[in-house]
Amino acid sequence: MSLCEQFRTDLTQAMKSGDKVRLSTLRLLTAAIKNRQIDKGGALDDAEALEAVRLATKQRREAIALGGAGTRYPGSVPARAAQYR
């Protein structure tokens, strides 16, 4: 089973189980993979999909780190940052 297929099956399981954090994380990752597929113009192998996941993870961590300074809701940023560590 390829990495893309595994994400799709995990996404379906998260929907069925009602795990909202896992579901939103998998949606972000599948969107990143889908965007990379569109950019490439074809299917991705596991290495390319993993690189898309790494890039998306890096972007989210940077956004959390930068978003803490000027946030309107100060309690929300540390809680979200703790999720991704």
Image: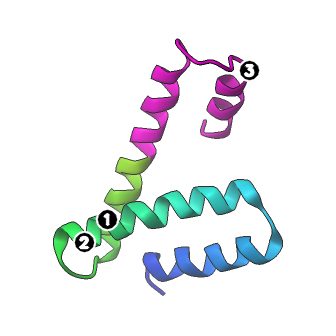
- What residue sits right under mark 3 in the picture? 75
Image quarter hosting the C terminus: top right
Counting the numbered discs, the total is 3
Magenta residues, as a range?
57-85
Compared with residue 76, is residue 4 higher up or lower down, i.e. above or below? below
Furthest residue to the front? 72
Residue 75 point in image, percent of width and height: 74, 20
Q: Compared with residue 17, is residue 72 higher up or lower down, i.e. above or below? A: above
Residue placed furthest toward the right: 17
Reading the image, the residue beneath label 2 is: 38
- Which label is found at residue 35? 1
Residue 25, disc: none
The Cα–Cα distance between marks 3 and 1, rounded to whole angstroms, is 31 Å
Q: Are marks 1 and 2 in contact (CB under 8 Å)?
A: yes
Q: Are marks 3 and 2 in contact (CB under 8 Å)?
A: no
* Residue 48, position as x, y percentages in the image: 28, 67
For image coordinates 62% across by 73% down, the residue present is 11
Q: Secondary structure at mark 2?
A: helix
- What residue is shown at x 39% (from left), y 60% (from top)? 32
